[in-house]
C-alpha cells in the first residue's frame, strides 16, 4: 500500500536493546496505517544520553525509552507530563517541532492488558507489586491516580519500597500503601490475602535459570497474577498449573506501544496488526 507524506523516524533506546520487540510491532503499525514511518532500536548508554537527545531533536519524530534509561532521559527533555516527572520514569518522547515532551505509557499499557486478560477495571481494587524498580514507580503512580484502593509493595531492597510508599502517600493521601522486604513471607501472605491482583515486576525470570522471586506456593488460588516478563517464568508456570488466572507481559508491551503510536501520529493504533507482529516476533507465529 502507498505510504503517505515525508518519512518520519522513530526509535526505542535502551542498553542493551537488540532484543527489543518494539521495532516489529511499531513498523507493522506504520504499514497498517499506510504511514511513511520507520522505527529502529538504538543502543544508548545512560552516560551518552545528552548527545543522543541532541541528535534526536532534529532526526527523530519520537522515541521510546527502555531499561536502564527511563529516568536518565528526563533531565534532557524540555517538558515532561507532571506524573511522569514525579515518578521519575518516561518511556515515550514526542518531538513537537523540536520541543521534546516526555510521558509514560507503561501504566496505561498494564491497565489495558488487565482489562483484556481478566476484564479487570483497576479502580477500587487492591494490588501487590512484587519488585520495586523503575517500572513499578510508573505503574504505582498510574494505578493510584486511576483510583486503586490499596497498594502493597515488596522489594529485595526494602529502602526503595519505603521511599516509593512514602512518595505515593504524599501525592495520594487517601491511598492505603504498605511495604515489606521481599523475604518477609508473613507480610507477603498478608498483602496477598488483601489483594485482588499480584503483579510480578522483578527482573527475576528474564533468564531461564532464574529462581522465582518468592515461593510460588504463596500465591493464593483466588488472586489474579500478571507477570510483566514475556516468557513463562517459574511463577507464571506455577499459576498456570494451579488454575490461578494469569497472563504474561506481552499484553502490557502491546498496549504501551499502541498508546505511544497514537501519541506520535494522532491516529488510533492498529492494535490487532501490532499484536500479530509482536506474536510473530516473539513466538515465531501470529498464533
Ligand atoms: N511488559 C512490559 O511492557 C514491561 C515494561 C517494563 C518493564 N518490564 C519488566 O519489568 C521488570 C523490571 O523492570 P524495571 O524497569 O523496573 O527494572 P529495574 O529498575 O532494574 O528493577 C529491577 C527490579 O528487580 C529486582 N531484582 C533484581 N534482581 C533481583 C534478585 N536477584 N532478587 C530479587 N529481586 C531482584 C530489583 O530489586 P532491588 O531494588 O532490590 O534491586 C528491582 O525491584 C523487568 O523484568 C522488565 O522486563 C516489562
Image (cartoon, rainbow, N blue to C red):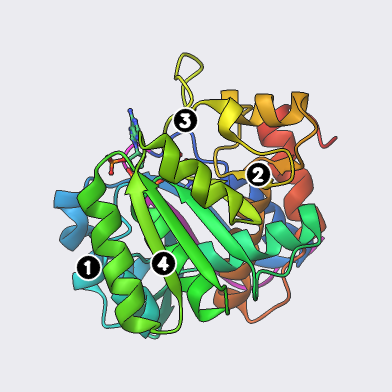
The reply to whether residue 218 is visible in this rendering is yes
Circle 2: element type? strand
Structural crowding at the residue carrying mark 4, measured as other residues with C-alpha within 10 Å and reported as few (<14), some (14–19) or many (≥20): many
Residue sitting at 51 percent across and 51 percent down?
191
Q: Write the residue at 41% across / 54% down.
A: 153
Q: Which mark is residue 162?
A: none
Q: Are marks 4 and 1 in contact (CB under 8 Å)?
A: no
State the quadrant of the N terminus: bottom right
Q: Residue at x 27, y 70 (%)?
A: 166
- As drawn, 60 above or below 152: below
Check disc 2: other Cα within 10 Å, few if <14, some if 14-19, many if 20+: many
**Horizontal relation, residue 252 to residue 241: left or right:** left
Marks 3 and 1, the one that precedes in the sequence: 1
Q: Position of residue 35 (x, y in %)?
A: 68, 68
Instruction: Verify whether residue 2 appears in magenta.
Output: yes
- For the question of whether residue 80 can be seen, the reply is no
The residue lying toward the viewer, choosing from 28 and 79, is 79
Where is mark 2, residue-wise?
A: 225
Q: CA distance from mark 2 to mark 1?
A: 41 Å
Q: Which residue is mark 1?
A: 54
Q: How many marks?
A: 4
Q: Which mark is residue 214?
A: 3
Q: Closer to the camera: disc 4 or disc 2?
A: 4
**Which residue bears the numbered disc 4?**
177
> Between tags 4 and 1, which lies in front?
4
Question: Considering the numbered disc 1 on the image, is that residue within a helix, a strand or a loop?
Answer: helix
Across and down, in percent, residue 51 comes to: 17, 59
Q: CA distance from mark 4 to mark 3?
A: 20 Å
Residues in magenta? 1-16
Amino acid at each position: 500500500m502507498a505510504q503517505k507524506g515525508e518519512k518520519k523516524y522513530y526509535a526505542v533506546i535502551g542498553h542493551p536493546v537488540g532484543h527489543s520487540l518494539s521495532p516489529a510491532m511499531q513498523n507493522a503499525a506504520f504499514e497498517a496505517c499506510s504511514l511513511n514511518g520507520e522505527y529502529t532500536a538504538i543502543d544508548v548508554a545512560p552516560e551518552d544520553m545528552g548527545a543522543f537527545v541532541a541528535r534526536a531533536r532534529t532526526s527523530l519524530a519520537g522515541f521510546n525509552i527502555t531499561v536502564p534509561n527511563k529516568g536518565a532521559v528526563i533531565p534532557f527533555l524540555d517538558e515532561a507530563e507532571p506524573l511522569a516527572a514525579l515518578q521519575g520514569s518516561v518511556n515515550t518522547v514526542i518531538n513537537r517541532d523540536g520541543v521534546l515532551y516526555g510521558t509514560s505509557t507503561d501504566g496505561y499499557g498494564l491497565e489495558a492488558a488487565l482489562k483484556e486478560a481478566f476484564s479487570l477495571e483497576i479502580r477500587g481494587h487492591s494490588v501487590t507489586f512484587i519488585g520495586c524498580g523503575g517500572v513499578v514507580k510508573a505503574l504505582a503512580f498510574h494505578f493510584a491516580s486511576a483510583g486503586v484502593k490499596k497498594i502493597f509493595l515488596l522489594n529485595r531492597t526494602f529502602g526503595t519500597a519505603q521511599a516509593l510508599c512514602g512518595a505515593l502517600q504524599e501525592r495520594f493521601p487517601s491511598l492505603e500503601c504498605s511495604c515489606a522486604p521481599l523475604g518477609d513471607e508473613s507480610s507477603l501472605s498478608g498483602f496477598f490475602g488483601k489483594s485482588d491482583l499480584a503483579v510480578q515486576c522483578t527482573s527475576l525470570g528474564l533468564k531461564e535459570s532464574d529462581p522465582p522471586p518468592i515461593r510460588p506456593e504463596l500465591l493464593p488460588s483466588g488472586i489474579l497474577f500478571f507477570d510483566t516478563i514475556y516468557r513463562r517464568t517459574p511463577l507464571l508456570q506455577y499459576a498456570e498449573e494451579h488454575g490461578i488466572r494469569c497472563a504474561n507481559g506481552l499484553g502490557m508491551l502491546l498496549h504501551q506501544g499502541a498508546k505511544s503510536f497514537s501519541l506520535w501520529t494522532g491516529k488510533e493504533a492498529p492494535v490487532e496488526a501490532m499484536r500479530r507482529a509482536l506474536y510473530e516476533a516473539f513466538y515465531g507465529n501470529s498464533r
